[in-house]
Amino acid sequence: MDADLVNRSKEITKRLKQLGDSLDYSAKLQEGKAIELKMGEPDFWNDNESAQKTVMELKALKAIVGPMTELTSSAEDMSALFEMAEDDDSIVAEVASEIARLEKILDDLELKALLNGPNDSAGAILSINARDGGTDANDWADMLLRMYSAWAVGEDFKIELLDRQDNDEAGINHASIAIRGPMAYGYLKGEEGMHRLVRISPFNSEGKRQTSFAAVSVSPEIDDSFVVEIEDKDVRIDTYRAGGAGGQHVNKTDSAVRLTHVPTNTVVQCQNERSQHQNKETAWKMLRAKLARIEEERREAEEARKYETQARTGFGSQIRNYFLHPDQRVKDARTGHYVGNFNSVMDGSELQGFLDAFLMLKAGKIEATS
């Protein structure tokens, strides 16, 4: 048997044990079984909000437990494959293919193990704001909204539109969405910052190259059990008429709500619901999520330093550059991760590589490029 295959198999077994210990696999296995028993109780769905939270917890556990169980079983079967390959050379190729498959699953799980922050397992509230670049920036913000939505759909995550303000000419001024799925916030929090697009402007009759910026903000979607201290006196509440689609009701009443947390100058807004009460309730959830993010950054001083410059607009502040001219490419300014196909990133299919690269940067597995 090829010595390299034997060594790779041994390395899989070693890494699998280390990963199982770091993830506390046995405890997660038992926790998943307990949740499944709870979901089988007759009154489980009486409290829909609590039930949905439990379902999300089970999905997050299965994202770890399922692949770990498969890996453990497949690794145990490897010895039998090796024995068969000793007597039949034609099986060696099958052994090599199986080892490569297990290595890929293991690599993915080791990345998930890096999602160990206090809110990493939560859903994400992702906001996009057009910045420098005029109408092109509004269009670019809308393109980013579609990119993240496509990624979420590809991951089988749920998306809810919380707020959207269309620009009069094209694109959006601002939008906020909730993305709900296992480790959504853990994966997406590295997207916070300025995103820069360079292209030939479709809004310029002279066909000149245009540089546009859009700011992405990501907060964990926390539930009511997470305590965030907010003094009512610190919050300014403004109501206004909602714009865009929504029917006559939203356009004739001051149903939209904007909350401003004065001490931190944190602003959230919601106009997607039909009633002011519903918009206010959603806006408070968004504000709590934003303040939870601020608290998380304060606790992690090193992480906070990484985000210090991300509120700036203009050249030099971007975390990622997207090019449609003179060639098509996307490159992350922090990790150096590069994709030579612009459209495959924008349709969400190759966005995951950027998310994974940022996780590896945080874990010290790769060096920063800037």
Image (spheres, rainbow, N blue to C red):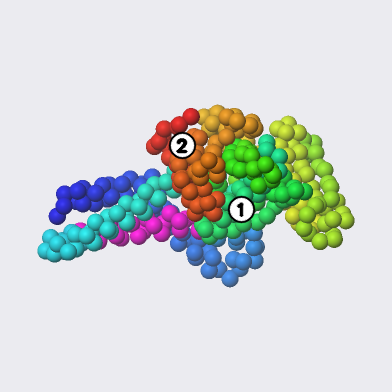
Viewer-side residue, 42 vs 207: 207
Tag 1: residue type?
A: Arg
Give the residue drawn at x 64%, y 63%. 48
Q: Is residue 305 left or right of residue 18?
A: right
Viewer-side residue, 111 vs 316: 316
Question: Which residue carries the number 2 mark?
Answer: 335
Of the two numbered discs 2 and 1 on the same chain, state the one appearing first in sequence.
Answer: 1
The secondary structure making up most of the magenta span is helix
Q: Secondary structure at mark 2?
A: loop
Give the residue drawn at x 58%, y 40%. 198
Residue 196 is situated, as x and y percent measured from the top left of the image, at 59, 38
Viewer-side residue, 208 vs 359: 208
Vertical arrangement, residue 157 with respect to residue 18, above or below: below
How far apart are the two marked residues, 2 and 1, measured between alpha carbons? 23 Å
Q: Is residue 53 left or right of residue 68?
A: right
Q: Which residues are magenta?
A: 57-80
Vertical arrangement, residue 169 with respect to residue 298, above or below: below
Residue 265 is situated, as x and y percent measured from the top left of the image, at 73, 33
Quarter-of-image position of residue 308 = top right
Q: Is residue 31 left or right of residue 42?
A: left
Asked if residue 320 can be seen in this view, the reply is yes
Q: Crowding near pointer 2: few (<14 within 10 Å), some, many (20+)?
A: many
Q: Secondary structure at mark 1?
A: helix
Vertical arrangement, residue 8 with respect to residue 267, above or below: below
Asked if residue 138 can be seen in this view, the reply is no
Q: Is residue 220 left or right of residue 236?
A: left
Q: Crowding near pointer 1: few (<14 within 10 Å), some, many (20+)?
A: some
Question: Which residue carries the number 1 mark?
Answer: 146
